[in-house]
Image (cartoon, coloured by chain):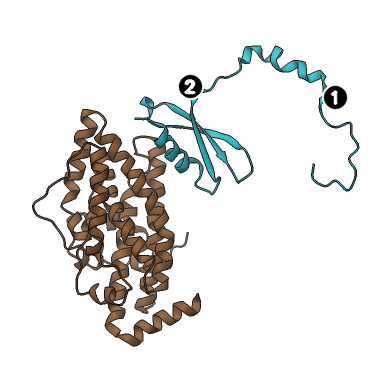
Chain colours: A cyan, B brown
Amino acid sequence: MAHDWPLWEVFIRSKGGLSHMHVGSVHAPDGELALRHARDVYTRRLEGVSLWVVRSNDILASDPSKAGPIFEPAETKVYRHPTFYTIPDVVKHI
Amino acid sequence: MMQLVETAAEAHRAADGTLEASLFDYLLRLGDDSLILAQRLTEWCGQAPALEIDLSLANVGLDLLGQATLLLDLAGEVEGAGRDGDALAFQRDVLAFRNALIAEQPNGDFAQTIARHFLYSSFQLPLLEGLTRSADPRIAAVAGKAVKEVQYHNEFTAEWVIRLGDGTEESHRRMVEGLDWFWRFVEELFESDAVEQPLVEVGIAVDRASLRAGFDARVAEVLKAATIATPVYPRAVSGGRRGHHSEHLGHLLAVMQILPRTYPDARW
């Protein structure tokens, strides 16, 4: 039954060359079946060409209560965005 | 492609009128297996052991329904009496259905459903592989599409046979009981008759007897991993190909056909 099964996070590569993106999670008794469940739940409409699953418990997450010290210092560093350059008209793809 | 299709159909007609009739019957056998199994699997919707399994079984059912649509549409075309796949699915009575008995049996518990579909897909996979080389390009095209679907059905159900068989005491017992229940219907899948012989001779149909070794090897491999002994059942049951069905098919058709029969002109 689902409540006995561990949770797995599902990542899909939508097409060759792109990165795998997190799309959701499934319950499954083991990795092989987690892949099959991910296929059946998340790729019914041609969403991808490759699947990853990883045990949710194996993911380390940043502590939400420390979001301030972790993320806020970047707020004042606008110069890190490459928006101060003039891009020549001939450059189409950037 | 259209050219090929027409040529093949004309070749059948020119060769022999009865070959055409055999082909119609053969397509019903293939299409009805998929249709009835699809209908059975829909009964799991909203009731499977987990949401993920619910979707898996529905996906398998939808694959089978797609196969049935193509095969029964083709059967209607071969028959040439103006019936399409819908007419054949919803306006035939129980005696006119040509599915194997295994397809119409009740789902039982999850293990029993898995047992049925593992056995059926272990037969259907080599059948479709053979049909991709059918002398009739229309059948070869349907088989080419379906073979990938069924490969997945077979792998998915095999995974579950192994997990339940090699799982807890209760899951093992249920898996063994499921396989025991369906084993009596396996023989029928490999039976051939006067309808299929002429089609096999001209390379349109696959000789069912030739699929048995592959089936046995696959089942033995998976049951071994599942720590289950191959079932023995002394007397096989058959008759579905001739329209001799169990009581279950009538009940299944009642549910499946009630809407189109009650409101024949309904559109949705």
Q: Residues within 10 Å of mark 2 (few under 14, many from 20)?
A: few
Residue B199, located in which quarter of the rendered image?
Answer: bottom left
Tell me: residue B142, above or below residue B222: below
* Residue shown at 28% from the left, 66% from the top: B29
Q: Is residue B241 left or right of residue B135?
A: left
Q: Amino acid at mark 2?
A: Asn
* Residue shown at 42% from the left, 72% from the top: B137
- Residue ID for mark 2: A57
**Chain for numbered disc 2:** A
Counting from the top left corner in percent of width and height, residue B242 is at 19, 68
Q: Is residue B153 left or right of residue B108?
A: right
Residue B90 seen in this snapshot: no
Counting from the top left corner in percent of width and height, residue B182 is at 19, 49
Q: Amino acid at mark 1?
A: Tyr
Identify the disc placed on residue A79: 1
Viewer-closest of B258 and A83: A83
* Residue shown at 61% from the left, 17% from the top: A62
Q: What kind of element bears circle 2? A: helix
* Residue shown at 21% from the left, 65% from the top: B241
Identify the disc placed on residue A3: none
Evaluate whether label 1 is on the same chain as label 2.
Answer: yes
Tell me: residue B164, above or below residue A91: above
Q: What kind of element bears circle 1? A: helix
Q: CA distance from mark 1 to mark 2?
A: 37 Å
Q: Earlier in the sequence, mark 1 or mark 2?
A: 2
Looking at this view, name the residue that lies furthest to the bottom.
B14
